[in-house]
Image: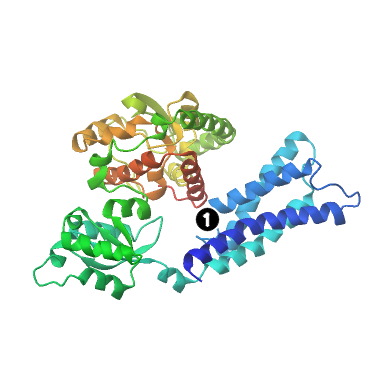
Amino acid sequence: MPIETSMSVARFLSFFGTASAIFGFGWVHATQIDPTTYDPIGTSVFPWTVLFVAGVLAGLYAMGLPELATSRRSVVGSTVLALAGSIVFVSLFQLLLGTPLLPRSVVGVGGFLVLPVQLLAWNVADDRQRLAAAKEQVVLLAEPDGASDLVTDLTGQVERPATIAVHLTPDEVDGSFVDDDVVLRSIEDAGASVLILDVAAQAVPRIVRQAAAAHEAGIRIRTLSLFTEEYLGKLPVTELERVSLLFDIGELHRARYNRLKRLVDIMFAVLLLVPLAMVVPVVIAGNVLSNRGPLLFRQDRIGKGGQPFEIFKFRSMLPYDGPSTWTQVEDSRVTTFGRFMRRTHLDELPQVVNILRGDLSLVGPRPEQANYVDELREKIPFYDVRHLVRPGLTGWAQVKYQYGATEQDAVEKLQYEFYYLRHQSLMLDARIIARTARAVVGQQGR
């Protein structure tokens, strides 16, 4: 079975099987088990069952099932966490409303049935040799620098897996003694399904003729820029200035999206006020024990339109009044309790206030300090494009790239931010929120 087909089957089993298991047991409970019997659809139990199922499915996606599980143990652990979150959610509502919303057996047994479903889905998805073979074989026609960067990028977190099977430079293909079928022969020998051409390769007639023949034979042709965008989820730095004005940005060019996005921001921020209030006493106690100093960290950042605003965080570093510097991984200024907050992202919770004030959005490019922005503006003329939208609590660059602590990291992250600006939508925002939740659960803090 082709890898794309097997992964589609696994996802179908994971999500449709989960919904079927819970709804199925709910129907059996209503018609066969409960002594009073009741209509499984015509009562208030049904909408709460739908909400419970939606919560479980969201939890499964956030935990990366079935694709990201590496063992049966991780399947079990991830499934239990996804179920626990939904059960706690429903239980809190039952406690607040003072009435049972779902029969306990529907929650318990229905949830228990989800586990074998997830194990089955994982078995369909988990074939390491097939997964390795599933990486699309690619023939790359590019200058050495571009090829080196692409090879490195493909070893990281990608949107679609691929391997550079053959790399040829434009000069090698256009040499006087090279036959006119070298590209086609390389594609055939490698079993490649994609041919990538950089800007230099697109200017060579001999390469373009062979690319046209490959296209007729069913091989997909991509420019280096389009391949990077489609497979890696970013725009290459060499293309940033050229394309900086050549796409619509949701917040600027789609008024309905802008309004919906703001509405979603407010709804999430109001919900997050509850955990913020619950965490404050914990942070106060942690500060007393191993993080002496002010509760909050305040700092000026650059927001939408290049306007400064004051961002709020729980302080995680030793009080410091000197000039700001890039925060390093395992920074010595981070306190013991501060390291815990960073790892669990608790230090970010006060930014809920920034979201309600309109300084931040839930999703968008992360705001930088003014002095860093001034430096990056001088070195990257198109850097200010990221300030056309409201900055975010989380963003595409944050879920795709490791914590950045240098100017080069800022350039790398900008490639992902341009991808976000180009594809900005509620669906992409939802994907980013889900991946952020996955990172928080996995404690992938800095």
Q: Residue 164: tell me if it is visible.
A: yes
Answer left or right for 191 relative to 108: left
Which residue occupies 22% across, 47% down?
A: 238
Question: Residue 26 in the image: x percent, y percent?
Answer: 77, 53
Question: Residue 160 in the image: x percent, y percent?
Answer: 40, 58
Residue sitting nearer the eye, 292 or 244? 244
Which residue occupies 86% across, 56% down?
A: 32
Question: Residue 397 in the image: x percent, y percent?
Answer: 37, 45
**Residue found at the far left of this picture:** 176
Q: Secondary structure at mark 1?
A: loop
**Residue found at the far bottom of this picture:** 189
Q: Residue 323: tell me if it is visible.
A: no
**Residue found at the far right of this picture:** 36
Residue 149's place in the image compared with 97, above or below, is: below
Residue sitting nearer the eye, 86 or 132? 132
Task: Classify 10 Å Cα crowding around label 1: few (below 14), some (14-19), many (20 and above).
Answer: some
Residue sitting nearer the eye, 49 or 227? 227
Answer left or right for 422 relative to 436: left
Residue sitting nearer the eye, 315 or 350? 350
Identify the amino acid type marked 1: Gly
Name the residue tied to disc 1.
64
